[in-house]
Image (tube, grey):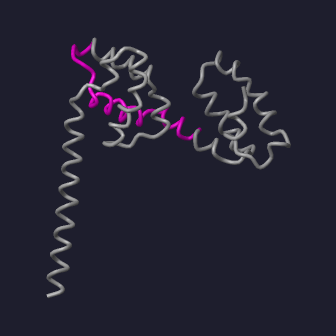
């Protein structure tokens, strides 16, 4: 009798999980056809709504901090306007999700992820060399000059920063 009761509970739990999963998938499918709120607003209001729209697609797919940095408001807005011109229809959450998936296959994304991981490490020469290499690969020569990497290196390897993480020192560099 007790065994039948346990099987009944297991069946109920499985049914609930399957139903919740199906509902979540339906919500994501219907979201894909909707126009993001920020697209229907003027610039200042759109900037306020943009993170909320990002949260909606994050409920359907993984959105990490690198994605949010590389596909910020201005980039997504520009691509939305470009897509509207090319396809003659409004930009949708589905288009945005496709942009995210495409971004995650690009070298720029992988480089940014690697850099974000490296700056979380304690300051050391090997990781600094790797960071410099990645920065040089991903930036234009004019922008490299403005970074003044030699000055950044001096600050990072100053004895007072021994034992700190790259990010802890870099966030205070102007």
Image position of 99 (left or right of 67): left
Residue 92 falls within the magenta-colored stretch: yes
Q: Where residue 117 sits in the image (x, y, percent)?
A: 58, 44
Q: Where residue 146 sits in the image (x, y, percent)?
A: 69, 18
Image position of 121 (left or right of 52): right
Residue at point 73%, 30% (across, down) = 173
Image position of 22 (left or right of 58): left
Residue 62 falls within the magenta-colored stretch: no
Is 15 above or below relative to 107? below
Is 13 above or below relative to 131? below
Image quadrant containing the C terminus: top right
Is 8 above or below relative to 138? below
Going by the picture, which residue comes out furthest to the top? 85
Helix, strand or loop: magenta stretch: helix
Residue at point 21%, 67% (across, down) = 13
Bounds of the magenta segment: 86-115
Quarter of the figure with residue 95: top left
Residue at point 38%, 19% (across, down) = 77
Q: Nearer the viewer, residue 69 or 154?
A: 69
Is 71 above or below relative to 59? above
Q: Where residue 97 sits in the image (x, y, percent)?
A: 32, 33
Residue at point 35%, 31% (across, down) = 53
Q: Where residue 96 sits in the image (x, y, percent)?
A: 32, 29
Image quadrant containing the N terminus: bottom left
Q: Nearer the viewer, residue 122 or 32?
A: 32
Quarter of the figure with residue 33: top left
Image position of 152 (left or right of 80): right
Going by the picture, which residue comes out furthest to the right? 159
| Labels in figure, total | 0
Quarter of the figure with residue 49: top left
């Amino acid at each position: 009798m007790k065994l039948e009761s346990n099987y009944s509970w297991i069946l109920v739990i499985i049914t609930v999980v399957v139903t919740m999963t199906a509902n979540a998938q339906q919500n994501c499918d219907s979201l894909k056809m909707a126009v993001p709120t920020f697209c229907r607003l003027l610039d200042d209001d759109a900037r306020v709504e943009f993170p909320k729209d990002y949260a909606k697609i994050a409920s359907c797919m993984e959105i990490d901090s690198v994605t949010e940095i590389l596909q910020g408001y201005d980039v997504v807005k520009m691509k939305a306007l470009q897509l509207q011109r090319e396809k003659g229809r409004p930009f949708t959450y589905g288009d945005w999700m496709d942009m995210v998936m495409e971004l995650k296959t690009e070298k720029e994304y992988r480089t940014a992820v690697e850099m974000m991981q490296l700056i979380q490490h304690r300051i050391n020469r090997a990781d600094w060399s790797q960071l410099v290499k990645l920065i040089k690969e991903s930036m234009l020569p004019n922008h490299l000059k403005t970074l003044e990497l030699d000055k950044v290196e001096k600050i990072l390897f100053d004895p007072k920063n021994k034992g700190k993480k790259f990010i802890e020192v870099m966030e205070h560099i102007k």
